[in-house]
Image (cartoon, helix red, strand yellow):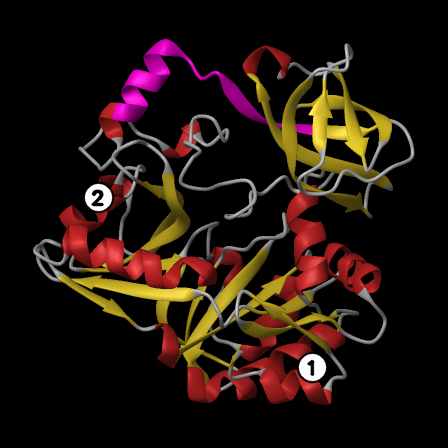
């Protein structure tokens, strides 16, 4: 397994390590997933995301190159701003979901999923290398997420950056955090406020140690993959490889808001235009279990007549809500709040109900 620059730091903290897509990653620390989930919702969680991929686009035609690859409108980005988007195949299927940051008019940074890095790099080079330099900086980049309602307060003593002035998806390319030369973005994957901090891989452990100490000062702690998954599920954030893949389109996945069909051309635009005109036949639906039971990935989803209509893509406990929640693709006519469905949980049929929007939203539950 590959190791992030923080592997030894995790061992010292007593982390339980697992194989995550070929990476040795912490699933939890002493105290457990639930404790880490609650610490992130109530204070700050610190996450190792060094396994994520960072691919840079540089040159006078960098914006054109990135626009060719992604569905969102690159022309809307100013320096120091980013957005969430997807890259599609000509069929409209999703190659990956990613964040794009504009560092300057001739320099864009994309952050891609670790499990897709090799595929993304090859796709990006094939489609865009004739327009600009496409450089994979993943191996030399460290990345730590600092997430939670107390994130800005805990982090502010470590930097001269005025964190309250950094907007959502704002990005500062050159600053210092705890004496480490860094870049910082106000982004995350937990449904909370927070930051993702980039640095040289060789400096990642120094940065991590400072962030863990800062989190502890407000009641926070390091958090592993287990809490990361329950947090993102509560916020109804999709996971590539489960909720998204090359056989699903952003319109089916409820990501139409990142698809700008009237903007500049991009790979997959014509297929998505056609799908929008005809309408999608299925949608990624969110639902809450109304009886005792957990809907796991791959479980069949039935209508009230007992006919299978889809499969669970992501599911599990929502600790903040004290409920069990899930997502899965269902025929579009079933995607109405209050629709009753049934999940076959290993032979036991458990009732559930379709809900709209995130299960948990900052400031309410």
What residue is pinned by disc 1?
Answer: 213
Between 126 and 193, which is closer to the camera in this rendering? Answer: 126
The C terminus appears in which quarter of the rendering? Answer: top right
Asked if the residue under mark 2 is in contact with the one under mark 1, i.e. CB atoms within 8 Å, the reply is: no
Q: CA distance from mark 1 to mark 2?
A: 40 Å
* Residue 8 image point, x, y percent: 62, 89
Whether residue 289 is in magenta: the answer is no
Q: Earlier in the sequence, mark 1 or mark 2?
A: 2
What residue is pinned by disc 2?
Answer: 67
Q: Residues within 10 Å of mark 2 (few under 14, many from 20)?
A: many
Q: Quadrant of residue 236?
A: top right
The N terminus appears in which quarter of the rendering? Answer: bottom right
Check disc 2 and report its element: helix, strand or loop: helix
97 lies above or below 343: below
Which residue is at a point 78% across and 44% down the rendered structure image?
318
Q: Which residues are magenta?
A: 271-286
* Residue 301 image point, x, y percent: 70, 26
Which residue is at a point 58% across and 81% down the rendered structure image?
208
Q: Residues within 10 Å of mark 1 (few under 14, many from 20)?
A: some
Which residue is at a point 90% across and 29% down the rendered structure image?
291
Check disc 1 and report its element: helix, strand or loop: helix
Left or right: 172 with respect to 204?
Answer: left
Q: Is residue 215 visible?
A: yes
Query: What is the number of the mark on residue 169?
Result: none
Between 247 and 209, which is closer to the camera in this rendering? Answer: 247
* Residue 110 image point, x, y percent: 33, 58
Which residue is at a point 73% across and 14% down the rendered structure image?
339
């Amino acid at each position: 397994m590959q190791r992030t620059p923080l592997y030894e730091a995790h061992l010292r903290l007593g982390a339980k390590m697992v194989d995550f897509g070929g990476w040795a990653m912490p699933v939890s620390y002493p105290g457990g997933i639930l404790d880490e989930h609650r610490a992130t919702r109530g204070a700050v969680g610190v996450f190792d995301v060094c396994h994520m991929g960072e691919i840079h686009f540089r040159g006078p035609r960098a914006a054109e190159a990135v626009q060719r690859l992604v569905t969102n409108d690159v022309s809307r980005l100013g320096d120091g701003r980013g957005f969430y988007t997807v890259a599609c195949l000509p069929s409209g299927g999703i190659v990956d979901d990613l964040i794009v940051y504009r560092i300057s008019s001739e320099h864009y940074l994309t952050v891609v999923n670790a499990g897709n890095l090799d595929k993304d790099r090859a796709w990006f080079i094939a489609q865009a290398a004739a327009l600009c330099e496409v450089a994979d900086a993943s191996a030399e980049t460290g990345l730590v997420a600092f997430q939670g309602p107390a994130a800005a307060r805990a982090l502010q003593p470590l930097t001269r950056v005025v964190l309250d002035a950094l907007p959502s998806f704002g990005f500062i390319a050159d600053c210092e955090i705890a004496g480490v030369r860094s870049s910082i973005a106000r982004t995350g994957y937990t449904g909370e406020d927070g930051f993702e901090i980039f640095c040289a891989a060789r400096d990642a452990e120094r940065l991590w140690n400072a962030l863990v100490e800062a989190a502890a000062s407000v009641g926070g702690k390091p958090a592993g993959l287990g809490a990361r998954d329950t947090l993102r599920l509560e916020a109804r954030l999709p996971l590539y490889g489960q909720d998204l893949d090359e056989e699903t389109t952003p319109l089916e996945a409820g990501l139409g808001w990142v698809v700008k069909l009237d903007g500049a051309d991009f790979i997959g635009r014509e297929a998505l235009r056609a799908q929008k005109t005809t309408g999608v036949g299925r949608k990624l639906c969110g639902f809450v279990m109304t009886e005792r039971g957990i809907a796991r990935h791959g479980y069949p989803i039935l209508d009230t007549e007992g006919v299978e209509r889809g499969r669970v893509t992501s599911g599990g406990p929502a600790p903040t809500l004290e409920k069990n929640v899930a997502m899965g693709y269902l025929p579009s006519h079933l995607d109405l709040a209050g629709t009753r469905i049934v999940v076959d949980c290993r032979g036991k049929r458990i009732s559930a109900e379709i809900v709209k929007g995130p299960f948990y939203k900052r400031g309410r539950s």
